[in-house]
């Protein structure tokens, strides 16, 4: 028991007479070792925090950072979005599905995409065209994450190509030709509805595409419908289609004016349409014509308001007032950024795009639509010019996200839409009419394998 061989071995010895004494050099070396170990540990724990995205990958568009033309940037959060875009989107061809050609060109096939790309509803064409050219497009359905269903239904309706009943019938017919739509119950299919009507343009939307991804600038139609077709958890708010002549960098048809040269405090350029908020603004302009401009817009005849004239008026105020019209969204909100006036939102239910990366309190003002009057003008007048300039500068940075530009552009509406779409991707697809077996075979209610599903099919 007392033998040295029976003593427990000491792992750390406090005194060892055979080792040299610890010198100051040893102490400094030990401290350096601890410091370097700490630094390397932090570096490997956060491998991307010390390098800008551009140094990690020369393909800027694959990072979750959007770069502005003036050197600024913003980034989509990695949680739920990922660190880079890796989508595969299948775009249905118009000759592939019975009914798509009518939704794109009308019953007689005479309506052109070029005619539909103009105006505030042109997003239905621009998104389609940009996806056809996208590096994220796949021609293989079996490898697609998402499916895009092209349709210019709003334009076709406005130009007399299809009426409401025909639009509804044609959508249903087209959907019944899509096995992948039935497989997922439409959850992985994308539709664009570019107007204030939203998906209500397809009267049976609640029956057939209530689970699908809807791209629309309109987030609310409860004023005219029992329920809104927009669902903030599955759908995506997109920017409206601003005139191409205003979005070209350095070559806009109407350049912004210095604040000191702007004639009005605020303006509203639009028709009354019998809407209370708009009527209040027009009446307010009559009482304070030196502060608020509300010209009577004419869209036909010799006194028609041209696009150039419209933007020249819009740029002549510090604040551009954007009240609710037939629906809650308004193109004027997006247009204001390109003449560099601060948008004042007078539409309580309005929704805005890319809220995960844009702080709208920095670039706009939202005022209760129930308080339109002198109080509003006095408030706007009290805002110092330096604050107005600050908001204009912040808006100048993010306005590239309103522009439907090719993927080569480092900042665009399509970049934002792609990031939002990536968040919607699911690993697994199911519906009430989809079943699966132990060997991972997908079958329908009649036990027919997915590869053998033949159109037309009963829809989920």
Image (tube, rainbow, N blue to C red):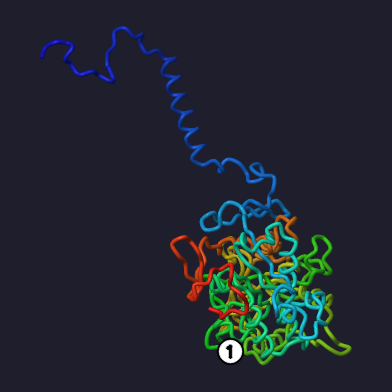
* Image quadrant in which you'd find residue 143: bottom right
Q: Residue at x 60, y 72 (%)?
A: 179
Residue at the farthest top position: 18
User: In the image, residue 419 lies at what x, y percent?
Assistant: 61, 60
Place of residue 234 in the rendered image (x, y in percent of width and height, measured from the top left)? 54, 70
Question: 290 or 356: nearer the eye?
Answer: 356
Q: Residue at x 63, y 51 (%)?
A: 63
* Residue lying at the far left of the rendered structure: 1
Query: Which residue occupies the extreme right position in the image?
Result: 302
Q: Nearer the viewer, residue 6 or 95?
A: 95
Q: How many marks?
A: 1
Determine the residue positioned at 75% across, 78% down.
Answer: 101
Image quadrant in which the N terminus is located: top left
In which quadrant of the rendered view does residue 75 lie?
A: bottom right
Tag 1 residue: 224
Residue 292 visible to an observer of this rendering: no
Q: Position of residue 355 (x, y in %)?
A: 57, 65
Please tell me whether mark 1 sits on a helix, a strand or a loop: loop
**Residue 414: which quarter of the image?**
bottom right
Residue 384 percent across, percent down from the top left: 65, 66
Q: Nearer the viewer, residue 25 or 247?
A: 247
Q: Is residue 105 above or below residue 64?
A: below
The residue sitting at 35% across, 10% down in the picture is: 21
Q: Residues within 10 Å of mark 1 (few under 14, many from 20)?
A: few
Residue 438 in sight in this render: yes
Q: Is residue 228 left or right of residue 157?
A: left
């Amino acid at each position: 028991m007392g033998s040295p061989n029976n003593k427990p071995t000491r792992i750390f010895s406090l005194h060892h007479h055979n080792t040299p004494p610890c010198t100051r050099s040893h102490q400094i070396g030990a401290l350096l070792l601890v410091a370097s170990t700490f630094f390397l540990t932090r570096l490997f724990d956060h491998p991307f925090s010390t390098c800008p995205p551009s140094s990690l990958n020369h393909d800027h568009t694959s990072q979750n950072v959007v770069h502005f033309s003036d050197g600024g940037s913003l980034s989509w959060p990695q949680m739920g979005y990922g660190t880079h875009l890796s989508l595969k989107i299948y775009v249905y061809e118009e000759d592939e599905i019975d009914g798509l050609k009518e939704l794109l060109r009308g019953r007689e096939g005479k309506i052109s995409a070029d005619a539909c790309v103009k105006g505030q509803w042109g997003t239905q064409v621009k998104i389609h065209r940009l996806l056809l050219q996208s590096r994220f497009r796949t021609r293989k359905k079996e490898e697609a994450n998402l499916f895009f269903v092209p349709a210019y239904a709003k334009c076709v309706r406005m130009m007399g190509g299809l009426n409401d009943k025909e639009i509804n019938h044609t959508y249903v017919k087209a959907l019944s030709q899509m096995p992948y739509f039935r497989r997922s119950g439409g959850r992985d299919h994308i539709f664009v509805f570019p107007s204030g009507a939203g998906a209500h343009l397809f009267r049976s939307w609640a029956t057939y595409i209530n689970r699908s991804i809807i791209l629309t600038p309109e987030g609310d139609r409860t004023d005219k419908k029992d329920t809104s077709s927009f669902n903030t958890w599955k759908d995506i708010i997109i920017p409206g289609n601003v005139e191409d002549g205003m979005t070209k960098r350095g070559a806009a048809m109407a350049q912004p004016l210095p604040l000191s040269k702007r004639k009005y405090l605020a303006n509203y350029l639009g028709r009354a349409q019998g809407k209370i908020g708009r009527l209040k603004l027009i009446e307010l302009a009559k009482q304070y014509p030196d502060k608020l401009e509300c010209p009577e817009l004419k869209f036909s005849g010799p006194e028609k308001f041209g696009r150039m004239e419209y933007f020249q008026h819009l740029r002549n105020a510090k604040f551009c007032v954007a009240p609710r019209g037939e629906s809650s969204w308004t193109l004027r909100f997006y247009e204001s950024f390109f003449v560099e006036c601060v948008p004042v939102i007078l539409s309580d239910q309005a929704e805005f795009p890319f809220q995960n990366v844009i702080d709208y309190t920095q670039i706009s003002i939202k005022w209760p639509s129930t308080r339109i009057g002198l109080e509003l003008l006095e408030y706007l007048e009290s805002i110092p010019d330096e604050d107005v300039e600050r908001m204009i500068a912040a808006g100048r940075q993010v306005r590239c996200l309103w522009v439907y530009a090719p993927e080569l552009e480092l900042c665009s509406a399509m970049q934002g839409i792609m990031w939002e779409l990536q968040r919607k991707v699911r690993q697994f697809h199911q519906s009430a009419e989809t079943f699966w077996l132990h060997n991972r075979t997908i079958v329908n209610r009649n036990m027919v394998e997915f590869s053998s599903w033949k159109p037309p099919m009963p829809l989920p």
